[in-house]
Image: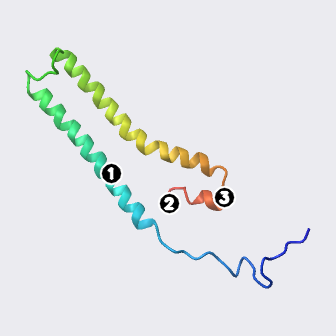
Amino acid sequence: MPHTDLLPGVTERDCAPRVVCDPRPAIRRARRRALLADVVQLALVAVVDVMMIRWPIAHVPFLTRHDSIELMIAVNVAMIAFVWLTRSFPKWSARRIAATWCAAEQSRLRPR
């Protein structure tokens, strides 16, 4: 079956899509804000760790000092895992979805 144009004389190469907006500055700002939020969260955890270690009588109510330190270590591991996973899952999802795209679209996701 022959390919028919919607409008006579109009071809796809003559009607390239126009870029209406450039999302790169907004993406850059969002990445900076996310990085700042991660740094603030991890700095807060570090400050609590320093206070807990330097102040020998500090402990969680109803827990011994040793149990409080173990809880602090578990919270640190959970916080670091959370920060790492919130950055990794979107990348993994984008790669999985992009596997169905053409080569030109896939190249947009590759790091430059």
Is 41 placed left or right of 2 in the picture?
Answer: left
Residue 50 in percent (x, y) is at: 15, 33
Q: CA distance from mark 3 to mark 2?
A: 15 Å
Residue 42 in percent (x, y) is at: 26, 41
* Amino acid type of the residue tagged 3 in the rendering: Ala
**Residue placed under numbered mark 1 in the picture:** 35
* Relative depth, front residue between 20 and 92: 20
The disc label shown at residue 7, or none: none
Is 93 placed left or right of 38 in the picture?
Answer: right
**Residue placed under numbered mark 3 in the picture:** 103
* Amino acid type of the residue tagged 2 in the rendering: Arg
Does label 1 or label 3 sit earlier along the sequence? Answer: 1
**Residue placed under numbered mark 2 in the picture:** 112
Residue 95 in percent (x, y) is at: 57, 48
Q: Residues within 10 Å of mark 1 (few under 14, many from 20)?
A: some
Query: Does 61 sit above or below residue 5?
Result: above
Does label 3 or label 2 sit earlier along the sequence? Answer: 3
Q: CA distance from mark 1 to mark 2?
A: 19 Å
* Amino acid type of the residue tagged 1 in the rendering: Leu
Identity of the residue furthest to the front in this view: 6
Quarter where residue 109 is shown: bottom right
In front: label 3 or label 2: 3
Q: Residue at x 17, y 21 (%)?
A: 60
Residue 67 in percent (x, y) is at: 21, 16
